[in-house]
Amino acid sequence: MMFRLTEQPSVGRVLMRTLIALAYLIIFAPVVMIVVTSFFAQELISFPPPALSLAWYANAWAKPEFLRGLLTSFQVALLAAAIGVPIGTAAALAIVRGEFPGRQALSSFLLAPLAVPGVVAGSGLYMLYVLAEDFFDRDIKATTEGLVAAHTLLAIPWTVRLVVASLQGLDRRAEEAAANLGANPFTVFRRITLPMMRPGVVAAAMFSFIQSFENLDLSMLLVGPGRITLPVAMLNYLEFRIDPTLAAVATVQITLVGLLMVVTDRFVKLSRVV
């Protein structure tokens, strides 16, 4: 008679799995609570809810400021990503492949906005826009262009960070082989380098879009009448009403961002870059 000996999990492994599960619970519990609260029928939140309803989604749809904010957020996020990702990608190429003094200083300078609190950055940009308006004699603050320029500063550091990480893991032998076979530098970049660094560029575009789409602390200091973003519209609504309408709007926002990440991961494995 034969007995199969199974390896018993060690105490350390069980403890590690428990800590990981606890970390996931802490991370996702607020998100789950927001989604669940959006279906409560009553205005004042209480547990357990007496009934479930979709009325708060209908209420959010009936508020024109939320739709305008959503469209503005999409517009600003797309433009910021479209401008910031090429600039950040070029800077990342210069940092990784270039041979010039000051590369580390350039890298630190481009990544510095990630360490600056959003409120501080927004206040600084607001004062800069005021001075620029006096100098150029044209409106800059409270305009879509000024907001896009500010959000581009969010896209560039994320792009540099992710594309640099992607480039540092590439094998350069294919590029060297193409160059030895007579391909010019532009052809090598277009046919070899760019496809190999595509995961980093796509991930940078996604994170740049999400950072701009969900940004509040930078946007609330730079928006103007009729040009508010969705997070600012949610904050303005919170000043006058407290009900699950905001939970419904936040659920839609979470769903859109989640779908974007799933679709992106379908074509580019984010785990290879992030």
Image (spheres, rainbow, N blue to C red):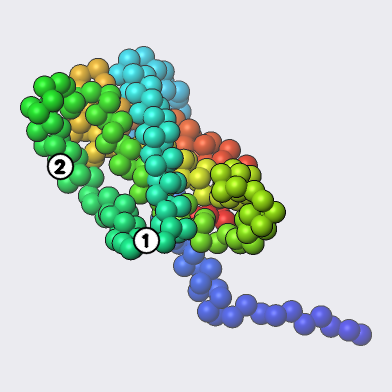
Q: How many marks?
A: 2
**Amino acid at pointer 2:** Gly
Q: Secondary structure at mark 1?
A: loop
Compared to residue 13, the image places residue 176 above or below, namely above
Per the rendering, the mark at residue 100 is 1
**Amino acid at pointer 1:** Phe
The answer to whether 184 appears left or right of 117 in the picture is: right
Which mark sits nearer the N-terminus, 1 or 2?
A: 1
The answer to whether 86 appears left or right of 199 in the picture is: left
Name the one closer to the observer, 229 or 140: 140
The quadrant of the image that shows the N terminus is bottom right
Residue 243 falls in image quadrant: top left
Name the one closer to the observer, 183 or 265: 183
Residue at 27 percent across and 50 percent down: it is 113
Residue 17 drawn at (x, y percent): 53, 68
Residue 218 falls in image quadrant: top left
Residue at 23 percent across and 40 percent down: it is 217
Compared to residue 12, the image places residue 159 above or below, namely above
